[in-house]
Amino acid sequence: MSKQKKSQSQGGRPMGPGGGNAMMMGGQKAKNFKGTLRRLLKYLKPRRNQLIAVFVAAILSTVFAIVGPKIMGNAITTLFEGAYGKLSGVPGAGIDFDAIGKLLLLLAGLYVISSLFTYIQQYIMSSVAQKTVYDLREDVNHKLEKLPLKYYDGRPNGETLSRVTNDIDTIGSTLQQSLTQFITSIVTIVGIIVMMLTISPILTLITVISLPLSMFVIQPILKRSQKHFADQQRTLGQLNGHIEEMYTGHQVVKVFGHEKKAIAEFDEVNEQLYDAGRKAQFISGIIMPMMSLIGNLSYVVISVVGGILVTQRAISIGDIQAFITYSKQFTQPVMQTANIANIVQSTVAAAERVFELLDEEEEEKEVTSETLSRAEGSVTFDQVDFGYGEELLIENMNINVLPGQTVAIVGPTGAGKTTLINLLMRFYELNGGKITIDGHNTRMMSRSDLRTTFGMVLQDTWLFNGTIKDNIAFGKDGATDEEIVAAAKTARADHFIRTLPDGYETILNEEASNISQGQKQLLTIARAVLANPPIMILDEATSSVDTRTELLIQQAMNRLMKNRTSFVIAHRLSTIRDADLILVMNQGKVIEQGTHSELIEKNGFYADLYNSQFATKKAI
């Protein structure tokens, strides 16, 4: 097997409780184990009656299974005594097949009943686990809706997705499998010890002594394997992140000839993953043979001592057989318990990551003292202050926009143009001042009411995997086919849609790469047309298309902006010459405002920007 294949085989979820190596997986540990565990148990509290039923079913299933070897031992004793008496010539001696048959029927009945209770416990627990995970996902989903934009801006998307999917899946898997196994293992350990004590306290002592001996021997190995498993998970995350970056940006990688460096980085991380995985699996693989060796030594001692006790008629031969069965069964639940204790560590760590997300600071609570049904479109910035951190980016901004006006926002990169739009949409809260729409303070309105007042067409188009019709209909709940087609015609998108093989039913792939950039933009404009908002925001909607497509998009936007208040962010100043008001921003401040002709006459910052673009085009 190649190193690459080996490293990949170490990825994914750890082996289950019955898989041996999961027991040795140390993984990530929780910072606050007790607090997180208590919080996780609160999600189980509403289903405590079901958990009690699971506990009872687990006890009954285990008890019926534990009694089995004792009954089998009685059957063997009956068979042995009958056969021994017949061979020794004892009068009236013989094998009592009726008694043996009854014991075997009883044994079969016990195992059937044990299986039935096992089924019941698994059935109930699956419902408990899935409902608990459902509640957790619901809480996380509601939380994501309440988180401010700065949370998403400050964290990688993959990190949030990992908490929502992988960590919650880990919790669900543990509840589904490990919890019932833990209950069963504890009951089995207690039950087996009780049954062994009823047979022979001496043999029980020998069996129990072997347990701490096993733990003493494997403890140093466990600690070493935990470090390597942690390294394995860490490097696996690095490898996945590298692959995702190189795959999603493969065109850029090829353009800049980065292939060799990308492969070299992959090989380096892959080598680290292979090395960590090999060491983790090798060290953890030693544990099973060592425990088997100690168990077999214990088995030999039990057989020798048991044989002596039989010759002394201290116990029967059937009891020896039963005891050996119990001693063999005793190791498995102990290993499972150690395994589950390890899994619980990783699960609580996963739960802690989910709870960290749930504890994130939410958007400022809404004060819905004002409502706005259909805005006329008057927008005012009144002494607005804002900064992403302690340092203010925007200070004492004052803007007054009349209904129906087209407002262009221009300025160099980093001037604060997009920030102004974020404040308008209340993606970020103001540090001071206020923004009003038709005289209503946006902080006194619900975010839902505020954002339905706006329609946005951004430079970065966003379309989801689905039909073109569904993507346009995203702008309005319950939109009819007629409304969708009308919106597409207004946006000049109807013609190209009908030229596609399936028309409006054409399915866009995950990245919508089966249509052109300009066509994507026309669809986002159609979506905004369908929403029919009183105020429009257009952020560099034509920056990444050709001249002909730009003309089509510009015509569509002109229709979209008709009789609406519109905010247009533009770098191509030729596209906003007819704007009613041009705001010139630099370093977070509006340094000039007026119409195109007024600003040209001032011969200030805007004039320099405009003339530099014109001069550049003329020179070209």
Image: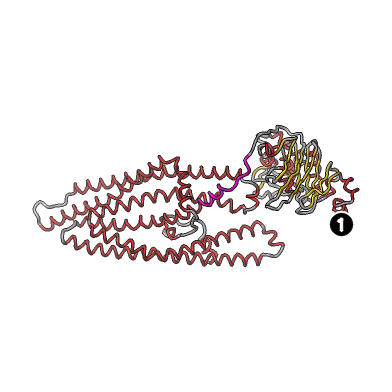
Query: How many other residues sit within 10 Å of disc 1, few (<14), some (14-19) or many (≥20)?
Result: few
Is 246 in the magenta? no
Q: Which residue is mark 1?
A: 616
Residue 203: x and y in percent read 24, 59
Q: Residue at x 37, y 66 (%)?
A: 217
Q: Is residue 333 above or below residue 376?
A: below
The answer to whether 427 appears left or right of 337 in the picture is: right
Instruction: Tell me, yes or no, if residue 485 can be seen here.
Output: no
Q: In screen coordinates, is 97 left or right of 415?
A: left
Residue 202: horizontal and vertical position, in percent? 23, 60
Let me know if residue 355 is in the magenta part: yes
Q: Position of residue 578 (x, y in %)?
A: 85, 43
Which quadrant of the view contains residue 466?
top right
The chosen color scheme is secondary structure
Q: Residue furthest top?
A: 373
| Figure check: 151 above or below 562 | below
Residue 480, percent across and down?
68, 33
Q: Quadrant of residue 439?
A: top right
Q: In the figure, residue 238 lies in which quadrant?
A: bottom right
The amino acid at mark 1 is: Thr
* Looking at the image, residue 80 lies above or below residue 593: below
Instruction: Check the image and name the residue furthest to the right.
Output: 601
| Foreground residue among 398 and 259 | 398
* Res 410 visible: yes
Q: Quadrant of the C terminus?
A: bottom right
**Which residues are drawn in magenta?**
351-365
Tell me the element at label 1: helix
- Camera-side residue of 536 and 251: 536
Task: Choose between 455 and 552: the one closer to the eye.
Answer: 455
| Count of picture labels | 1
